Image (cartoon, grey):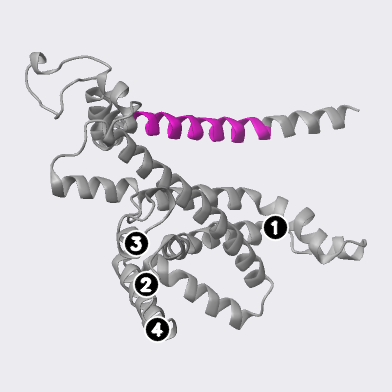
């Protein structure tokens, strides 16, 4: 009994320390102070001025929403590309010969265990080499190099999420579909893809998360483009880093933090409720069929 109580206290303490910085940002998003100050309650000026400033037409607000737009666009596009390439790669590897499977799995695990700074430097050297040697001094750094960097970062995680679902799938279903007259493309879209859809969805969410959180690959591979125009692409991570070099982080980022937290919380709750509701619906359908 004592061990159980201590274990629960330990778990809740760790969770509290993990979410404490987020709670602090949420609390001070309702303050009109430019900086976060701890002390007496007199230093906390309650108000919604920061939310008004965030949605106003000021220079800081435009910079924040530009960085936010760039971040979301890159995250969504890189996640879609990573899911398509990672899913097709996992399916091809699953039906390949054993030697090919081992080689591809080793190549896929290297970016996962490798340091992110090594991936960023490798991509930078490759882009500089291609620009100087093949394109004769052209500067390749743009949205496309940034997209390639995020895809390289996310693709192995999609593969690792799809692979277990392929191993859990009955391998004879695809062959049975072909025997019944389905074409290979129909067998892929109507038999294999529905069976591994949970892994694909998990890989998609993980790819978005990795892209949203990334700073090192973005800082090394970005160039002009997207909503930034002719200037270097600014994402939320690079914008915060640039702001720290100049002065303090803009206070308008605090209400944006709360908005992002609420959106992520709503998505997590929605996915959890859907997963809990789907098995119950299936069990009810099976019970009705048995009763009939």
* Residue located 69% across and 72% down the image: 95
Cα gap from disc 3 to disc 1, whole angstroms: 35 Å
Q: For marks 2 and 1, give the one nearer the viewer.
A: 2
Quick check: 160 left or right of 185? left
Name the residue beneath numbered marker 2.
Answer: 139
Task: First in sequence, mark 1 or 4: give its number.
Answer: 4
Contact? badges 2 and 1 (CB < 8 Å): no
User: Marks 2 and 4: CB-CB under 8 Å?
Assistant: no
Q: Are marks 1 and 4 in contact (CB under 8 Å)?
A: no
Q: Is residue 6 visible?
A: no
- Crowding at dot 1, Cα within 10 Å, few <14 / some 14-19 / many 20+, comes out as some
Residue 193 x %, y %? 71, 55
The one of 277 and 138 positioned closer to us in this rendering: 138
Residue at horizontal 31%, vertical 67%?
A: 115
Q: Is residue 10 left or right of residue 69?
A: left
Instruction: Name the N-terminal-most of marks 3 and 2.
Output: 2
The Cα atoms of the two marked residues, 3 and 4, are separated by 24 Å
Per the image, the residue denoted by label 3 is 217
Mark 3: which secondary structure?
helix
Mark 2: few, some, or many residues within 10 Å (few <14, many ≥20)?
A: few
Q: Earlier in the sequence, mark 3 or mark 1?
A: 1
Q: Which mark is residue 169?
A: 1
Looking at the rendering, the stretch of residues picked out in magenta corresponds to 258-279
Is the C-beta separation of discs 3 and 2 under 8 Å? no
Q: Is disc 3 surrounded by few (<14), some (14 to 19) or many (20+) residues within 10 Å?
A: many
190 versus 109 height, above or below:
above
Q: Residue 136 got which mark?
A: 4
């Amino acid at each position: 009994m004592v061990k159980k109580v201590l274990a629960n206290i330990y778990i809740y303490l760790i969770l509290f320390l993990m979410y404490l910085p987020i709670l602090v940002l949420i609390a001070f998003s309702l303050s009109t102070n430019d900086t976060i100050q701890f002390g007496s309650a007199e230093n906390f000026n309650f108000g919604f001025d920061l939310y008004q400033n965030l949605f106003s037409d000021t220079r800081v607000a435009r910079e924040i929403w530009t960085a936010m737009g760039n971040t979301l666009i890159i995250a969504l596009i890189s996640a879609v590309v990573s899911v398509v390439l990672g899913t097709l790669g996992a399916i091809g590897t699953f039906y390949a010969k054993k030697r090919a499977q081992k080689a591809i799995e080793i190549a896929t695990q290297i970016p996962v265990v490798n340091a992110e700074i090594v991936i960023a430097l490798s991509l930078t050297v490759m882009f500089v080499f291609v620009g100087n040697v093949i394109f004769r001094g052209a500067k390749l750094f743009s949205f496309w190099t940034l997209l390639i960097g995020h895809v390289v970062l996310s693709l192995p995680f999609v593969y690792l999420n799809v692979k277990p679902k392929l191993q859990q799938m009955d391998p004879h279903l695809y062959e049975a579909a072909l025997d019944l007259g389905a074409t290979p493309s129909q067998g892929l879209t109507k038999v294999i893809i529905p069976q591994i859809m949970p892994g694909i969805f998990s890989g998609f969410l993980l790819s978005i998360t990795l892209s949203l959180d990334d700073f090192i690959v973005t800082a090394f591979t970005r160039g002009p483009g997207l909503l930034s125009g002719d200037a270097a692409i600014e994402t939320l991570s690079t914008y915060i880093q640039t702001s720290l070099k100049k002065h303090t982080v803009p206070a308008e980022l605090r209400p944006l933090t709360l908005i992002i937290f609420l959106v992520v919380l709503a998505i997590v709750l929605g996915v959890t409720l859907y997963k809990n509701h789907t098995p119950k619906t299936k069990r009810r359908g099976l019970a009705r069929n048995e009763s009939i």
